[in-house]
Amino acid sequence: MKDMQAHLERLRNEAEECELISKLATNATKKALFAKLAEHHRALVKEVEEAVTSCSPSPSDDRVASERGGSPDA
């Protein structure tokens, strides 16, 4: 899970950097390219966030597991 969080942080940083480069670019082609890259990285961030959320047990899962005598990580 930590590796997914690290990857998520890296993608967020890359999206921000691409957006900044897009804003600073004087060449229209580069401006458009980096804007598109920023958008792509944001889409990847969203996908990874959804994956992390779906992999994380909810608090209700912990409660059900403990009521059954098992550990929430099982």
Image (spheres, rainbow, N blue to C red):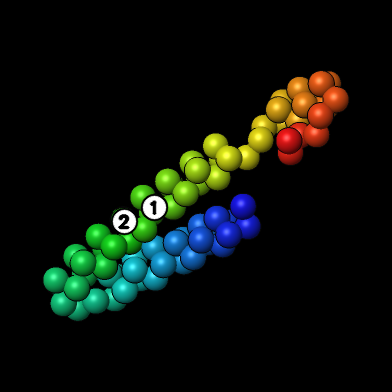
Residue 28 location in percent, x, y?
A: 14, 71
Q: Quadrant of residue 15?
A: bottom left
| Cβ atoms at labels 1 and 2 below 8 Å apart | yes
Q: Residue at x 19, y 73 (%)?
A: 30
Which of the labelled discs sits on residue 40, or is there none? 2
Residue 20 location in percent, x, y?
A: 35, 71
The image shows residue 19, relative to residue 58, as above or below, that is below
Q: Residue at x 39, y 52 (%)?
A: 44
Q: Do we see residue 16 in this rendering?
A: no
Residue 66 location in percent, x, y?
A: 83, 27
What residue type is disc 2 on? Answer: His
- Residue 1 shown left or right of residue 25 in the figure: right
Q: Secondary structure at mark 2?
A: helix
What residue type is disc 1 on? Answer: Leu
Q: Which residue is mark 1?
A: 44
Q: Quadrant of residue 14?
A: bottom left
Which residue occupies the extreme bottom position in the image? 26
**Nearer to us in this view, 13 or 53:** 53
- Residue 10 shown left or right of residue 20 in the figure: right
Q: Do we see residue 24 in this rendering?
A: yes
The image shows residue 61, relative to residue 32, as above or below, that is above
